[in-house]
Image (cartoon, rainbow, N blue to C red):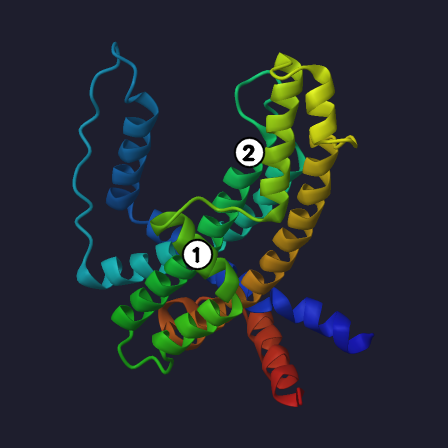
Amino acid sequence: NTDATDDVVLLGTHRAILLNGITRWLRGAMEDKERMARANKRMLATLTQHFEDFPVVDVPPENLTPEQELESAVVAGFLAVLGMLPAIRECEYYFRRYPFKDFPISRSDYLRNCCEMLFDRVCQLGDRMKFSLRAVKNQNPNADFDIGKMVKAYEKAFLRVVKLRNQSHHNSRYTDPDVSQLASVELLDIARSLNLNGADDTDNLWPFVLDSKGLYQRSAKKWVARVKAYEQTAEQFVELTAQIILDSCSFLTGLISEEDKERLKIAQRRELAKP
């Protein structure tokens, strides 16, 4: 039990410490008055872009030094990786609720769309992780890690998801026995509602009752469990990405507190103690 608790504590350690370092880095950037003024103008331009009566905001170029550009790419890359965790987690709630009762979107189509969205988001996390690690290599060419191995490990962990995503993108829409069964029941429901061949004929085609709502809920329950499992695996790769950045980017590591440094040492000792 103690080991399991330690693993849970360790899972977010590098991520939390890196975010503390990024926060301090951002505070440092905000102390640059010219850079902060440009950031405020960009925000104002975004907020007012569709207001016709508001004067157009002239946004000056960023004018970052090469070093600042490389550092900014590392920070932006990791934040993009981190942002994919809630994006994956949100899929659970799409599966849980079918919101289109009075619209021409069937439960089978909605279930299919939710599955394809989940596949996309898992693969997007892999793409963002690769982009983030490339930014780290650009900032520190001597960083000691292999991007290719990380990408292969991710694709291996999500092998089925990657295959299904590629298939739905390049070959045909996603389907599985649950989606097919649900679509068939919906077609039968349409036939019954229109009484195409007479009530007796359609009842003979399907002598027992299958409820499309119940079928959807049964399948959604399976996918909710899969989303949670995918999220747990994805968290491990986000944590590993954070660890690589902390090991490779001194401009962030140099900003972490003494308390965070001690947490890192504890995490490293526990990693070394694992069999």
Q: Is residue 209 above or below residue 9?
A: above
Question: Residue 192 occupies which quadrant of the picture?
Answer: top right
Q: In front here: 144 or 201?
A: 201
**Tag 2 residue:** 110
Residue 48: x and y in percent read 31, 21
> Residue at image x 45%, y 72%?
246
Find out whether the residues at labels 1 and 2 contact each other: C-beta distance under 8 Å.
Answer: no
Q: Is residue 172 above or below residue 97?
A: below
Judge from the rendering whether residue 154 lies leftward or rightward of residue 250; answer left or right. right
> Residue at image x 42%, y 73%?
152
Residue 215: x and y in percent read 71, 37
Q: Secondary structure at mark 2?
A: helix
Q: Is residue 56 above or below residue 176?
A: above
Mark 2, Cα crowd under 10 Å, few <14 / some 14-19 / many 20+, is some
Mark 1, Cα crowd under 10 Å, few <14 / some 14-19 / many 20+, is many
Question: Residue 275 occupies which quadrant of the picture?
Answer: bottom right
Does residue 179 appear in the picture of this structure?
yes
> Residue at image x 65%, y 15%?
193
> Residue at image x 35%, y 74%?
147
Question: Residue 17 occupies which quadrant of the picture?
Answer: bottom right
Residue 234: x and y in percent read 54, 61
Quadrant containing the N terminus is bottom right
Does residue 79 appear in the picture of this structure?
no
**Tag 1 residue:** 123
Q: In front here: 174 or 17?
A: 174
Residue 187: x and y in percent read 59, 27
Q: Amino acid at mark 2?
A: Tyr
Q: Is residue 19 above or below residue 9?
A: above
Q: In front here: 267 or 103?
A: 103
Q: Amino acid at mark 1?
A: Cys
Q: CA distance from mark 1 to mark 2?
A: 20 Å
Residue lying furthest right:
1
